[in-house]
Amino acid sequence: DLLKSNSSRLLLALGDGMDFQALLLDEDRAWLMVGAKNHIFLLHLDHPSREPEKIFWPAPREQVEHCQLAGKNVETECANFIRLLQPFNQSHVFACGTGSYQPVCAFIQLG
C-alpha cells in the first residue's frame, strides 16, 4: 500500500547483501544518508518517489585480493562496509569504511 501511494520507496530487495550499518539524518534538509556495503545512499525524505543518490565506494582491488588470499569471504568480508557518517560542517559529511581490512575515510561534499 505504501509503494502504491508513492509514500515510500523500496531501496533494495531482500538478499542484496548491502549490510546497512550507518545512518545520518538531516531533518532541516529532509534527507537520510545510509552507509552500506560499497555504497553510500542519499534518500530525499520529502520526495520518497525520487531516485536515491548513490555513491559507489568499493575497497581497492588490491586490498580485496589480499583479503581473499587471507581466506576471508569475498561477499561478506572483503568489501568497504561504511561504518561512520558524521556531519562535519554545512557542506561536508565525514565518512569512514572498513576498506576490506584497510580502513579509509573521506569527506563527502553535499550539494
Image (spheres, rainbow, N blue to C red):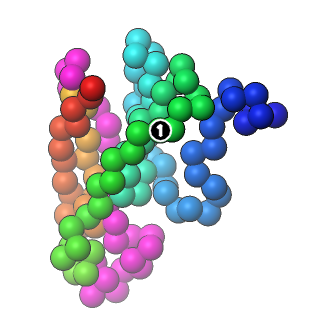
Characterize the local packing of mark 1: few (<14), some (14-19) or many (20 or more) Cα atoms within 10 angstroms.
Answer: some
The residue at the point 68 percent across, 26 percent down is 7
Q: Which residue is the site of mark 1?
A: 52
Quadrant containing the C terminus in the rendered view: top left
Residue closest to the eye, 4 or 31: 4
Q: Is residue 76 visible?
A: yes
Instruction: Quadrant for residue 58, please give it.
Output: bottom left
The residue at the point 46 percent across, 19 percent down is 30
Quadrant containing the N terminus in the rendered view: top right
The residue at the point 36 percent across, 57 percent down is 38
* The residue stretch that appears in magenta: 67-91
Residue 66 in the image, given as x and y percentages of width and height: 22, 81
- Residue 73 shown in magenta: yes
Residue 86 in the image, given as x and y percentages of width and height: 28, 32
Q: Amino acid at mark 1?
A: Pro
Residue closest to the eye, 54 or 27: 54
Residue 16 in the image, given as x and y percentages of width and height: 56, 62
- Residue 72 shown in magenta: yes
Numbered disc 1: secondary structure? loop
Q: In the picture shown, does residue 101 fall above or below 37? A: below
